[in-house]
Image (spheres, rainbow, N blue to C red):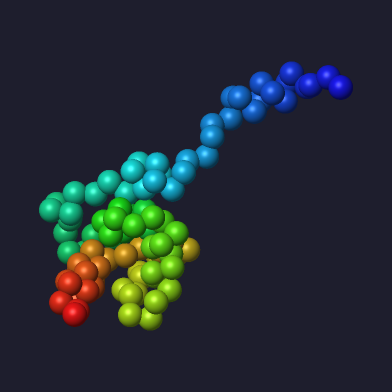
Amino acid sequence: MKSDPIRHAVRRALPKSETGPARIARLGAVDIGKLADDALLRNEQVAGILNVPLSTFHALRKRPDFVRPVHIGCRTRWRWATLRAWIQAQERMP
């Protein structure tokens, strides 16, 4: 059985999908010292701030005590001030 050279060429030309850590490293890099309180963050940025994988972030956001997102159209964003308050509340818990 002969292999199809065109199929192999196309497969080599297509970029490989990013893994979770690579995607967070590319999209989640945020300098939290420069963020304004009203800054809206993407999922990858919040996962990067929390230093958790994206899958863990999605499990975490389903918890009832987690920060409520801001919906802009079909996009979900997270306000930095409320996320920071949630992080500080977690630090105060025993």
Q: Where is residue 70 in the image (x, y as percent from the top left)?
A: 35, 69
Q: Nearer the viewer, residue 52 or 48?
A: 52
**For residue 43, above or below residue 92:** above
Q: Where is residue 83 in the image (x, y as percent from the top left)?
A: 25, 68
User: Image point 33% across, 43% down: which residue?
Assistant: 25
With 24 as the anchor, is 3 left or right in this view? right
Q: Nearer the viewer, residue 31 or 76?
A: 31
Residue 27 visible in the current orientation: no
User: Image point 43% across, 48% down: which residue?
Assistant: 20
User: Image point 45% across, 59% down: which residue?
Assistant: 55
**For residue 35, above or below residue 80:** above
With 84 as the anchor, is 16 left or right in this view? right
**For residue 38, above or below residue 45:** below
Q: In which quadrant will I find the N terminus?
A: top right
- Which image quarter: residue 71? bottom left
Residue farthest toward the left in the current orientation of the protein: 33
Q: Position of residue 62 (x, y in %)?
A: 43, 73
With 23 as the anchor, is 8 left or right in this view? right
Q: Which of 54 and 72 is in front in this view?
A: 54
- Which image quarter: residue 61? bottom left
Residue farthest toward the front in the current orientation of the protein: 94
Number of marks in the image? Answer: 0
Q: Where is residue 64 in the image (x, y as percent from the top left)?
A: 38, 81
Q: In which quadrant will I find the C terminus?
A: bottom left
Residue 80 visible in the current orientation: yes
With 87 as the anchor, is 41 left or right in this view? right
